[in-house]
Amino acid sequence: MASEKNVDLLITGGTVLCMDADLRTLENHSVAVDKGKILDIFPDGSAVYQARETLNAADCIVMPGLINAHTHLPMTYFRGLADDLPLQAWLNDYIWPLEAKLLDRDFIRASALHGAAEMIKNGITQIHDMYFDMPSIADACSQAGLRAIIGEAVIEARLSDPASRKALGTKVLEMRRRYWDDPLVDFDLAPHSLYACSQATLEQCAQVASEHGILSHTHLSETKNEVEQCLAQHGKKPVFYLSDLGLLALPAVYAHAIWVDEDEIALLAENPASIAVCTECNLKLASGILPLSSYLKHGVNVCLATDGVASNNNLDLLAELDVTAKLHKAINEDPAFLPAQQALGMATRNAAKALGISDKRGSLEVGKDADITVLDACCLNGQPLYNPYSHVVYALGARSVRDVVINGELVLRQGNLTKVDEAEIIASAKQYQTKIKAALH
Amino acid sequence: MASEKNVDLLITGGTVLCMDADLRTLENHSVAVDKGKILDIFPDGSAVYQARETLNAADCIVMPGLINAHTHLPMTYFRGLADDLPLQAWLNDYIWPLEAKLLDRDFIRASALHGAAEMIKNGITQIHDMYFDMPSIADACSQAGLRAIIGEAVIEARLSDPASRKALGTKVLEMRRRYWDDPLVDFDLAPHSLYACSQATLEQCAQVASEHGILSHTHLSETKNEVEQCLAQHGKKPVFYLSDLGLLALPAVYAHAIWVDEDEIALLAENPASIAVCTECNLKLASGILPLSSYLKHGVNVCLATDGVASNNNLDLLAELDVTAKLHKAINEDPAFLPAQQALGMATRNAAKALGISDKRGSLEVGKDADITVLDACCLNGQPLYNPYSHVVYALGARSVRDVVINGELVLRQGNLTKVDEAEIIASAKQYQTKIKAALH
């Protein structure tokens, strides 16, 4: 008799969407997880493992955890604070004054923890965050069990002198040293935008990113206005400016990238650039609708993001998938544009490519990190089920997220967070709500 | 000591969004329900009732039940069957052949029951349906406890002779007689579209609707192609053709109405016409984006709908609210366009106006029917909460629907359907899925 191998976790009987290079769809398959990795994916009953914990995933869809490629986690406490305003009024009259009054380590840690827990409940296993105070965000993600690559927003007004500009790279390396034994968090460089950084600062970012092989994360061409400003100040379109600065040649995620011309897209395609599409935020702030078909035609790597909750007002990446896939069919006058499977690829394997972690995540394959989302399709809005990809994108929604595994650990079990107390997080949000309301007056 | 009045149901401690003419928002208020009606809305503790059942709605939003103004309930079993196809291929190659092969009373009844239960779980208390076999749909809605106005699609190809055309009105009146004692269901006339009905049939519909004061329900200008066809065949734009037929002067709900010119919108505004906006369906089939700002500018009554699940692929009206409010901000390049409160009005009071039931439903007011939806905001995606309208539209989502009251009866309690067995409905869907898959080959 063959001896049974011991493993940490078995997920049995599901429909497994591998999202690997062959886009394999495996019905009635099980996934064995051990020591944080995917050990095996096998037809039910064809292998025997003794597991510490088993999830029955019959009637479920088992897929790579969703990756949210552009977020501002500590803004969660600003959800729905000021809607229906233009971007500049929203920033100048609400967000920035409140940040100036309220932000401290406790606020950031608590608001980020709330956001991290919410991400997990929405089936998201990794985020790409940009804000201030990297350690507080890292600690919050680590506590909830969420993976994150975290960058501190580089904004000219916050740099006191040339020395602090020089220290940009040092800071990232210092954070990596500090969290060397935490498998969940990593750090990158986040020059906020072309308009919020001087040319010298952007060039310094390029030098640091190049020297240390650090990913960068930047807002790009979100509004028409900032594009005009770039043309006026630098005499060139934003992507060409990025190119001249040396940044474009380096791996980077650009958020929004709505107001780009065809020649800019062609240039992006020649470089290791990825676009984080923030559809709901862009619609809500009336920033615009990006030329998605042109990006795809040129072969630019495109992934998806919620942006911060304050401009969305949710952290629901499944909803982004739904809206993005539908919207661009209408924009392109083609109902066959961006089928469900391709859309799901953007939120998984494309996002992993964008973050430079394709070797470890973004698909379910033996040897990769066990970052897995289980959706329960045994519900009214999940039946009948003819095509699992269609259901993930158009039908199931975040309420179907049942289990989430990150780094091999079950962080959401049957809809319940395992590492943090949801009631405590809600109680904290209510306390801060009172403070924030008071600060508004 | 004052004697306590006995009532059927009390909903205590919520934030009540009345959606009445004054758009009152009442914090810490209770709603007393008796004999199917709203008996009282009062500040917590200011009145005393003895209730058969009490719902604690602290941390909840209490609002009028959502009204879904254009649906095809029995198509629920076709969810996600054939995506990413043009409208005509989807209809000709999938939907119509399957309907021809499979539709019978049992199919319609079972698929409609599934849809009715799903509507309730999504916070919808009334639908406006168009399909075939009115009694099966009526029985399904009645069984689940969902309100419905049901019309049989009038399609030329299904009318055998002039006599059946004459019988159109008789049929509606017969249905009203048959269901006279059922408070949940009513019937109307549903000439499918200008392209699916002959001029004689449409004129007959107008005569019947006028003679008996029956609402009518029609697909209008969903595709560019049908508008061109109307121009070619009748020498006029669809709305002018409707006017000449006598239909436009009568109360009607027009679904889609995307490809309309300014002069058509002006004419619609002069008549008792309402538009059912089906944003997600229109995007998914790439039909287009309707000129919402122009409708609002002219004062046309606009409501919202999911359309049938087969082209959406969900029955989530809260998602329609979210996408519609966001999309049209971008289309109008104005983030202040269609604020959350106005959007919610479309799915409640405007829809009641469209269906000719403003005196009974669409708002929470003493004396009106008790059709009420309770959303639980005590959840990660519901906190903090600064503005309840914003949360209903942008943040909470269908997973927050906790309780639903229709005609004074609690049909969803703590997320559980009270009148039908969800597991049985799911089991039936799985059985039909097998039959439908077989019929595809």
Image (spheres, coloured by chain):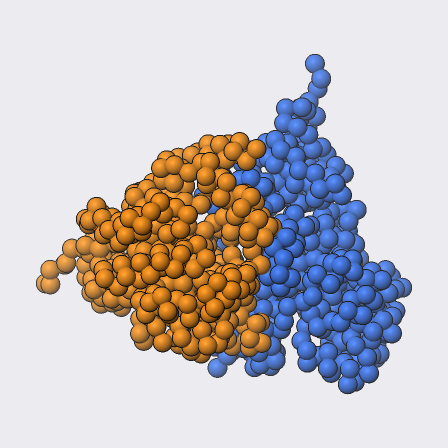
Chain colours: A orange, B blue
Viewer-side residue, A216 vs B267: A216
Q: Residue furthest right?
A: B211
> In the rendered image, which quarter is residue A7 located in?
bottom left
- Is B52 positioned to the left or the right of A113 in the image? right
- Which image quadrant is residue B185 in? bottom right
Question: Of residues A195 and B181, which is closer to you in this image?
Answer: A195
- For this view, does A284 lie left or right of residue A307? right
- Rendering coords of residue B365 (x, y %): 73, 39
| Residue B116 coordinates in the image, percent (x, y) | 60, 57
- Residue at 41% over, 47% down: A157
* Residue nearest the viewer, comparing B421 with A204: A204
Q: Position of residue B89 (x, y in %)?
A: 58, 81
Q: Residue at x 45, y 45 (%)?
A: A76
Q: Residue at the location (77% across, 69% down)?
A: B262
Asked if residue B280 can be seen in this view, the reply is yes
Closer to the camera, A213 or A238? Answer: A238
